Image (cartoon, helix red, strand yellow):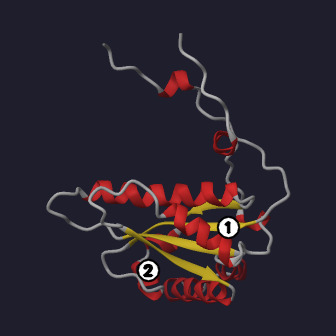
Amino acid sequence: MAREAPVNDTIEILKRRRSVPPPMMTGPAPSAGELATILTVASRVPDHGKLAPWRFVVFAGRARERASRLALDICLTDKPDLDEAARAEEQRRFVRAPLVVAVVSRAAPHPKIPQWEQVLSAGAACMKMIVAARALGLSATWLTGWPAYDARFRAAIGLDEHERVAGFIHIGRTTAAIEDRPRPPLAEIVTRFPE
């Protein structure tokens, strides 16, 4: 007879994971020790071939304002008549949360390891970062937005031409209750391969 696995803290954290909008996050930002823990956990993901096909760029303190300004400058290059509301939104892009970490995919052609597996490894690093933050009592949200896909912005934050942003992980604290959204019933997303 099959036994139910015991429910532990990790399972409870995973079951309750919610995205918290960055404007609902407050400080303080994670401490240096908390950030080191989060990044250490995020680096322990499946990594076929031990390539470490990802890296992290941390936007803390005033660096968040600088990144927001870079985003605004690029927007103004494309749309010099950008209205004040849109300008203000870009000016806040990276300062809404106390800390932002870019997970950078370094996926590249390899004789044995498919690029797709390398990209998935970067995605796993994003998710592990979120789980680690939550386990430390923090909130975290995985976002991309246009800067993740803009070659000028990527270059401005120090990415090489072949590197891509898998996600900007916004990390902070919140005391607000976050309403869950409907999740798909397992019956709609699970099939069994016949024996």
Would residue 27 appear left or right of 166 to someone viewing this image?
Answer: right
Horizontal side of 111 relative to 103 (left or right) equals left
Q: Height in image: 91 above or below 41? A: below
Above-or-below relation of 103 to 58: above
Q: Which comes sooner in the sequence, label 2 or label 1? A: 2
Residue sitting nearer the eye, 68 or 175: 175
Residue 144, x across and y down, in percent: 53, 65
Residue 126 image point, x, y percent = 51, 60
Observer-nearest of 50 and 118: 50
Number of numbered discs = 2
Q: Which residue type carries mark 1?
A: Ile
Q: Amino acid at mark 2?
A: Arg
Residue positioned 73% across, 42% down in the render: 180
Which residue was labeled with disc 2? Answer: 154
Q: Which mark is residue 171?
A: 1
Q: CA distance from mark 2 to mark 1?
A: 20 Å
Q: Is residue 157 visible?
A: yes
- Image-quadrant location for residue 159: bottom left
For label 2, the crowd category at 10 Å Cα-Cα, with few meaning under 14, some 14 to 19 and many 20 or more, is: some
In what element is the residue under mark 2? helix
